[in-house]
Amino acid sequence: MNLLALLSFAAIVLLCGALPARGQELPDGKGKEMVAASCNSCHPFYARLGAGYTAEGWRTVMRMMANHGVVVPADQVATITEYLTKNFPEKSKPAGAVIPGPAKVSIKVWQVPTPGSRPHDPLATRDGSLWYTGQMTNTLGRVDPKTGNTKEYPLKTPHSGPHGLDEDKAGNIWYTGNTGALIGKLDPKTGIVTEYKMPDPEVKDPHTLIFDQSGILWFTAQNANRVGRLDPKTGEIKLLTPPTPKSRPYGMAVNSKGTVFYVAFGTNKVGSVDPRTLEIREYPLPDAASRPRRIAITSDDIVWYSDFSRGYLGHLDPATGKVTEWPSPSGPKSEPYGISAINDIIWYSESGTTPNTVVRFDPKTEKFQSWAIPGGGNIVRNTSVTRDGNFVLANSLVNAVTLVTISK
């Protein structure tokens, strides 16, 4: 069986993003023929040159492939992993800047039980639990922070690629099936999963989801260039198309009036959806190179975004369209990603640094403070906030969930 024949696009990028482009010869060494034979039908790797991985990262990638259903002969795994580690090591990244400041935090990390789960999004629920999507194991996981005990819940459709997470008022956990073209609902009491399939076959990749104040579920579909609306009472799904083609709707947030905001990762724009008219409005950001990836909203309905491509924290006033930006502490290649607002203070992670960092920004003083994430962090794609105002991270490549407890 071809090594990559069964991989989703996400898994292909993980394995192949660091391999040479078409026309370049693989380096000599034991394992070269195995890698060449296994990846010869992988189209994305010819077009993508990634940053490579550490030895631990390559082992995680191999586990993720196995979790995703790819059959690799047992006697080849070690050789392939050693070859990839030696020839495609992780390229240097900027050092994570640690900046002193007034806030005090403690950081606790839990390893999730299944290696190669690739925890994608975290969720702090009302009962105090910390949930995560096990993207490559097709599970949702629940960590009890009091005991450290973890329970994993298997999902319905195989290899559905659970991605985004949110909780409804009844305590059900909703998720996006990013490679399954579905929205799912898990009842934690029974383990029963209900699925809502996309009504349009072109919409294959539901991404991030969020409930508004009326209980309507909104979601993005990045590569399909859609914003979706699901009514849990009827199961009806409506799909909206942003004005800008290939804008790649990504992270989402809802303001105090119920207006849905999203960032467009394929362009330099923030979008909003009127929940009554379903009209989409776009707000251009001043730098054409901006690629906002995640979003948070403070109590004054100001929109904050992490500019992944430029290494900036951004502030958009939707009433005026005015944008203000601050360079992230670790510089232009720091790749700010997951972001949340906690008591009107902005918290986010720099995902392109070694190690990844937790960053605090106080809008009143315009001052940054930052901490290194124990174990490296690698990579914080999204964040959540507990009911008592602490910061939750999922760390994909180190297979962990992290709680940042903020001293009050």
Image (cartoon, rainbow, N blue to C red):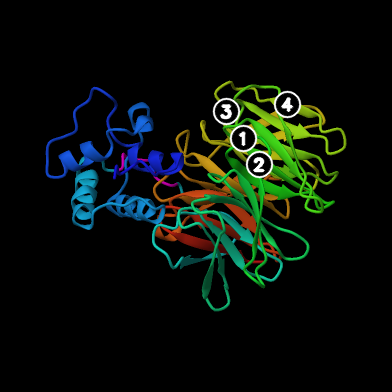
**SS category of the residue bearing label 1:** loop
Q: Which residues are magenta?
A: 90-96
Residue position marked by numbered label 4 in the rendering: 282
**Residue at 78%, 32% in the rendered image:** 318
Residue position marked by numbered label 1 in the rendering: 201
**Residue at 76%, 40% in the rendered image:** 260
Residue position marked by numbered label 2 in the rendering: 198
Q: CA distance from mark 2 to mark 4?
A: 24 Å
Nearer the N terminus, badge 1 or badge 3? Answer: 1
Residue 363: quarter of image: top right
Front-lying residue, 351 or 122: 122
Q: CA distance from mark 4 to mark 1?
A: 26 Å
Q: CA distance from mark 2 to mark 3?
A: 22 Å
Q: CA distance from mark 1 to mark 3?
A: 21 Å
Nearer the N terminus, badge 2 or badge 4? Answer: 2
Q: Residues within 10 Å of mark 2 (few under 14, many from 20)?
A: many
Q: Is residue 352 visible?
A: no
